[in-house]
């Protein structure tokens, strides 16, 4: 996620670290933070390993919960200092059972 552009189309993959559900009195918006480093909540090397995904007009997004692995695609912009993709295309990546 270090290689994400400041603005423009991008593809990235990672694990959902957190989700935010706003109260019913707020505008409908569901957001999730994706990290490309499992179990790492704070970057230790100065790089940004987090990406915010925001679905406008949604209170929930099926399959999107903490721990889900996914691949996302969309237009990157900045929101509160984090790279953000609004209404991303996403693909949930399953874990192979061995």
Image: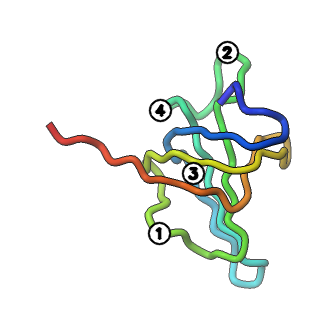
Q: Helix, strand or loop at disc 4?
A: loop
Left/right of residue 78 with respect to residue 98 in the rendered view: right
Q: Distance between the residues labelled 3 and 1?
A: 15 Å
Q: Residue 16 carries which label?
A: none
Q: Residue furthest bottom?
A: 25
Residue bearing the label numbered 1: 62
**Disc 3, SS:** strand
Pick the residue in front: 36 or 11: 11
Q: Residue 24, relative to residue 69: is it above or below?
A: below
Q: How far is disc 4 from disc 3 in space, using C-alphas?
A: 12 Å
Q: Residue at x 62, y 48 (%)?
A: 73
User: Do the numbered discs 3 and 1 sit on residues whose CB atoms are within 8 Å?
Assistant: no
Residue 92 against residue 25 in the figure, above or below: above
Q: Which mark is residue 18?
A: 3
Name the residue at the front extreme.
Answer: 9
Mark toward the start of the polypeptide (4 vs 1): 4
The residue carrying mark 4 is 38
Above or below, 7 against 54 in this view is above
From the image, tell me which residue sits under label 2. 45
Disc with the residue nearer the chain's start (2 vs 1) = 2
The percent position of residue 7, horizontal first and vertical second, equals 84, 40
Q: Which of marks 3 and 1 is nearer the N terminus?
A: 3
Could you tell me if the residues under marks 2 and 3 are in contact, i.e. CB atoms within 8 Å?
no
């Amino acid at each position: 996620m270090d290689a994400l552009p400041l603005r423009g189309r991008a593809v990235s993959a990672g694990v959902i670290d957190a989700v935010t559900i706003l109260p019913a009195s707020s505008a409908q918006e569901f957001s999730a933070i994706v990290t490309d480093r499992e179990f790492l909540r704070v970057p230790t090397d100065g790089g940004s390993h987090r990406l915010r995904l925001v679905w406008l007009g949604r209170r929930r997004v099926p399959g999107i919960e903490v721990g889900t692995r996914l691949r996302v695609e969309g237009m990157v912009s900045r929101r509160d200092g984090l790279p953000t993709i609004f209404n991303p295309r996403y693909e949930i990546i399953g874990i192979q059972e061995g």
